[in-house]
Image: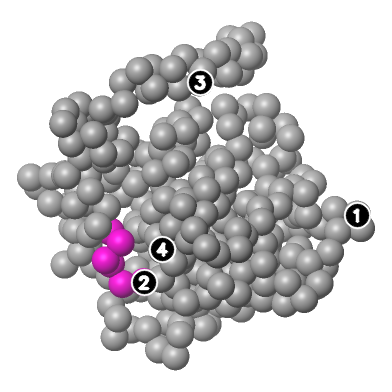
Amino acid sequence: MTGVCDRLMWPLVAARRGLLEALLPTTCVGCRRWIGAERGPVCETCQDEIDREMRTPACPRCARAMPTLSIFDKGCAVCKSERHWNLAGTIRVGGYDGRLREMLLRLKYAGGQRESDHLGSLLAARLLECGWLDSIDVIIPVPMHLLRRVQRPCNHAHMLAESCVRALRRLRPGAEPIPLSNSVIQRRKHTPSQTGAASRQMRFENVKGCFAPRKRSSLAGLTVCIIDNLLVSGATITEVAKAARRIGAKRVYGAVIARPPGPGDAPRHVSPELGTPAVI
Ligand SMILES: [Zn+2]
Ligand SMILES: [Zn+2]
């Protein structure tokens, strides 16, 4: 019963949080500390950490963090050996650590609009430098099942995609806006969250056949960018890409906020002063 009450109360909780955030605009969106006269979305410390994450070299095809020397011919040895990898390119903001992780968790479990807006701006900044942004015809957030939507305070991938599209409009004032669509591909199976999947194999089995094009929808000849908050094994995003290809997508790219460390990534350590990750 408590769970049902919690779910019903989410919109009120989120609305109250939004109101508080509007009244207290000088808290850092990364660490929630007061930032006084700086009045930016993030304080200097958080900005330094995010900048460091954004400078970490990553494979342009699978977004794994790794030394530049390990990236060959627009891809790394790891994704070249992964048969499921069907994305032409993938960008990420950083690793799943520190402030990025905290902002993502507040977005996902508390529907944080400020977090979404800031993360969306960071993703837009990344897209501007990726080299394939101008070829994108449509942006598609990873679809959420209706039952999951009832359980969560927001559809986080959709919120992120909306924030990113808004940021792209600001950053490219003269350019044709890229449309966002959440009506082309649907999540037709309600499966356990990927967060609870214990192994890589379970992640793939969990999402197999989960996504399907909606009736009479088409992406014929279009280049698509799929947006999600997190990329771990790639099981979810490549399954959405498969559905997009089934209705004619010519090329599919991915854009995520974070990819957690995995085999083949650059070594990392936590800076003792900041409690934040740094690349060594
Ligand atoms: Zn901060
Ligand atoms: Zn790669």
Q: Kindly state the secondary structure of the residue where label 4 is placed.
A: helix
Task: Identify the residue at the far front of this view.
Answer: 174
| Foreground pick, 196 / 129 | 129
| Foreground pick, 200 / 270 | 270
Callout 4 amino acid: Arg
Callout 3 amino acid: Ala
Total labels drawn:
4
Q: Are marks 2 and 3 in contact (CB under 8 Å)?
A: no
Label number found at residue 126: 4
CA gap, disc 2 and disc 3: 35 Å
Q: Is residue 55 magenta?
A: yes
| Residue 35 seen by the camera | yes
Label number found at residue 14: 3
Crowdedness near tag 1: few (<14), some (14–19) or many (≥20) residues, C-alpha within 10 Å: few
| Labels 2 and 3: the sequence-earlier one | 3
**Residue on which the image places disc 1:** 215
Residue 240: where, in percent of width, then height?
68, 60
Residue 123: where, in percent of width, then height?
44, 56
Q: Which residue is at 40% across, 60% downward?
A: 125
**Residue on which the image places disc 2:** 58
Q: Which residue is at 49% across, 58% downward?
A: 173
Q: Are marks 1 and 4 in contact (CB under 8 Å)?
A: no
| Labels 2 and 1: the sequence-earlier one | 2
CA gap, disc 1 and disc 3: 34 Å
Q: Kindly state the secondary structure of the residue where label 3 is placed.
A: helix
| Labels 4 and 3: the sequence-earlier one | 3
Question: What's drawn in magenta, residue-wise?
Answer: 53-58
